[in-house]
Image (cartoon, rainbow, N blue to C red):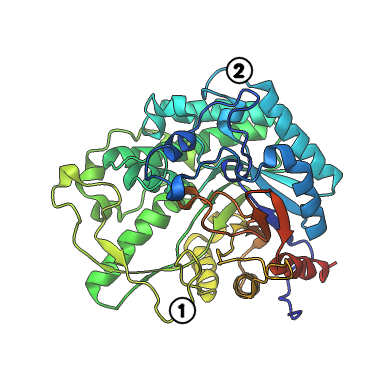
Amino acid sequence: MNDFPSFPPRFVFGAATAAFQIEGATGEDGRGLSIWDTFARRPGAVLGGDTGDVACDHYHRYRDDIALLKELGVRSYRFSVSWPRVQPTGAGSANTAGLDFYERVVDGLLEAGIEPAVTLYHWDLPQALEEQGGWRHRDTAYRFADYARLVADRLADRVPRWITLNEPWCSAFLGYGNGLHAPGAREGTPALAAAHHLLVAHGLSVPVLREAGAREVGITLNLDHVVPATGAPDDVAAALRAETQRNLLWTEPLFKGRYPDSEDDTWGELIRRQLFRRSGDLDIISAPLDFLGINYYTPSVVRNAPHREPDPLARTADDNRFEGVGMPEARHTAMGWPVAPHTLHELLVSLGRRYGDALPPVYLTENGSAEDDVPASDGAVHDAERIAYLDGHLRAVAAAIADGVDVRGYYVWSLLDNFEWAYGYSKRFGLVYVDYATQRRVPKDSFHWYRALISART
């Protein structure tokens, strides 16, 4: 396939990873425990009892992985910094060995002609902070700003693009709402407090990063294209509740400086009981940004549903009277997610319509598919379905640009197969196959396809 979509001359093609998913070395060089270290050791929390202790051993093999990035031809590499590697307890002075590692990574990327893009928080909260309340407590937001300063003071002179948080929806609702992710809590109003404090943490860190010399500062959200299953009023209302939880709870404070009008219908008594919002918080949260990162994989088709828990006092923040109905007509990835690239175009265009000039330039900071990858008899990994997925979504991005949306880059998820959170090592998203027993890396057909796409533009 060489009929590649067309992009503007300075469009950034990149690849992405996250610290806990690839680094391993969880007990080395002064790194503290994260909530994911603790969660992964809870029986039944992670498929197969998998942990991040070794993962892709990137901590020791980062030079090899940078060589893969150079071979791939990407202009930028998005990776995350492990908070407990830099601040083992989430407070106090920096762990020099941790910062030294990230400095080596940054310098190695620059030597290879690759632009580093740093994510400060990709879900690995220091366990010590969780034991003090975690994101439920406002103090964690201030601790995050302190941590941001430590990292930026060391790296901002060489890292142009900074992402404060990755997918705060997952941290709040999967971590504190339904318990599927670390720290594994199932809570109501405290989960909504976590969502708010994540946004406050983001807002507090923006001026810190700018003062340290960061040229571009943004946040990454996993936004959904939400569609009601039918045109019935109940299903339309359910879709608004789903969009409120997934999108508007984040985008309205960030880009409009307000909370969504639909939050009362979405959370009812849970939000009415809140005491965590303070005067001035919206001013902090809505600090102007240089870009918005969007992670996108699949759409959501939802219908009306009753509360799972009839008692409002016992209800979680994830119990919002909607349920997914799927797209049986679509191909599904190994994650069970329907493939519908046109919905990415629709999401991008709808964001432009909703927020207009308040919407900053956009980067697709994650997009990719998990497939059932198995090396063939020739040792290669033939992943035609992933190539089709990437091609379709890149064409959707190109169409959105043609329709006036300012999209400036695309980062494929992921460079490497890795620890896929609660799925452990059972799901493979990488352009590069990782044999976890030997740590051997094998570029898949999609790696060569993406390299050809990038090369065709140079």
Q: Nearer the viewer, residue 457 or 264?
A: 457
Q: Residues within 10 Å of mark 1 (few under 14, many from 20)?
A: few
Name the residue carrying label 2.
Answer: 93
Residue 40 is tagged as: none
Residue visible at 36% across and 56% down?
A: 244
Pair 1/2: label in front: 1
Q: In this view, does 148 lie above or below 18?
A: above
Residue visible at 84% across and 49% down?
A: 113
Q: Nearer the viewer, residue 247 or 222?
A: 222
> Seen from this angle, which residue lies furthest front?
377
Residue 444: quarter of image: bottom right
Q: Residues within 10 Å of mark 2 (few under 14, many from 20)?
A: few
Q: In this view, does 221 lie above or below 338?
A: above
Residue 39: x %, y % from top left: 42, 38
Q: In this view, does 450 lie above or below 213?
A: below
Residue visible at 39% across and 38% down?
A: 42
Amino acid type of the residue that numbered disc 1 sits on in the rendered structure: Ala
Name the residue carrying label 1.
Answer: 330
- Residues under labels 1 and 2: Cα distance? 51 Å
Q: Nearer the viewer, residue 122 or 261?
A: 122
In this rendering, would 216 be left or right of 174? Answer: right
Residue visible at 38% across and 24% down?
A: 132
Residue 288: x %, y % from top left: 57, 44
- Residue 13: tell me if it is visible: no
> Seen from this angle, which residue lies furthest top?
92
Q: Which of 48 and 452 is in front in this view?
A: 48
Of marks 1 and 2, which one's residue comes earlier in the chain?
2
Amino acid type of the residue that numbered disc 2 sits on in the rendered structure: Ser
Residue 328: x %, y % from top left: 39, 78
In this rendering, would 356 be left or right of 406? Answer: left
Residue 139: x %, y % from top left: 43, 25
Residue 212: quarter of image: top right
